[in-house]
Amino acid sequence: MFATPGSATGRRTVRCARSEARGTVGRFLSANRTTIAPVLALAVAVLAWELLAATGRIPKYLLPSPSSVFAYTSSHLGLFVPHAWGTIQSTLYGFVFSVLFGVGLSMLIVWSRTFEDAVYPLVVMTQVIPKVAIAPLLIVYMGFGQEPKVFLAFLISFFPMVINTTLGMKSVNVELLELLATLKATRWQVMQKVRFMRALPLMVEGAKIAITLAVIGAIVGEFASGNVGLGYLIASSSSSLDTVLGFSALLVLVVIGILLFEAVHVGGRLLMPWASRGRE
């Protein structure tokens, strides 16, 4: 027999279907909470911005609407592509140098306590100096080319690599080190096989921070020198009160930063597949 919608069996079937649908939606929301929540928050913020701009209480040259920014960006891609590529190059060069220098310096710090006592305060000192203040000096020493931008990107991004890698290398269990000593393992073997692998997760987390800071360093360098880069576009837009251009450059910069961060994240998962399996 078939259950009619008005019968008791039909009502139970409808309730079960609704309950199953709610459970499916609940599981989907729970599994994708970290993605859905920021997307919804961003959508609300953009909508509020659009409504505020539509009221006309704030002049358009001070606060352009998101729709006008998106339209300007899509219609002027030929303008943004070369500048975006210049920023990406400076960022990646500075990031690669920061990873290589940061890991190498951390190995020396862990290797020698004397070296750590001598160098660690200098590493901290490089971070308390405002990068905007030294940008003009770098132009004097390096010129108006790409070198000061790369150096600023490196200078601002190597610190988290040093801190995270050093912390990871020093977190090896003391009993394990004593066991390796009884097995006649050399210091280099301990560094390569134990300390480096122990520090790898923290190194990846440090690289995620470093890539975002490298973007900031490249932009600071572009503010001060050269005629290529998104930082240059933002600086020139502020001098001419072309806020649509400035917001469009910021939009492109945000997209680049997110893509670079995700690239480092994916690279870390490929480098440590066991960590991904552990979270499943």
Image (cartoon, rainbow, N blue to C red):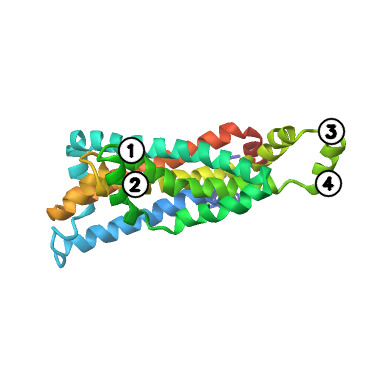
Question: In the figure, residue 106 lies in which quadrant?
Answer: top right
Q: Secondary structure at mark 2?
A: helix
Could you tell me which residue is drawn at 55 percent across and 56 percent down?
A: 121
How many neighbours does mark 2 have within 10 angstroms: few (below 14), some (14-19), or many (20 or more)? few
Q: Disc 1 designates what residue?
A: 147
Distance from Cα at disc 4 to Cα at disc 1: 46 Å
Could you tell me which residue is drawn at 13 percent across and 58 percent down?
A: 61
Q: Marks 4 and 1: which is nearer the front?
A: 1
Q: Marks 3 and 2: which is nearer the front?
A: 3
Q: Disc 2 designates what residue?
A: 254
Residue 277, x across and y down, in percent: 65, 36
Q: Marks 1 and 2: which is nearer the front?
A: 1
Q: Is residue 214 left or right of residue 203?
A: left
Kind of residue at badge 4: Glu
Q: Disc 4 designates what residue?
A: 175
Kind of residue at badge 3: Lys
How many neighbours does mark 3 have within 10 angstroms: few (below 14), some (14-19), or many (20 or more)? few
Kind of residue at badge 2: Val
Distance from Cα at disc 3 to Cα at disc 4: 14 Å
Q: Which badge, 2 or 4, comes first in the chain's sequence?
A: 4
Q: Quadrant of the N terminus?
A: top right
Question: In the figure, residue 108 lies in which quadrant?
Answer: top right
The answer to whether any part of residue 235 appears in the image is yes
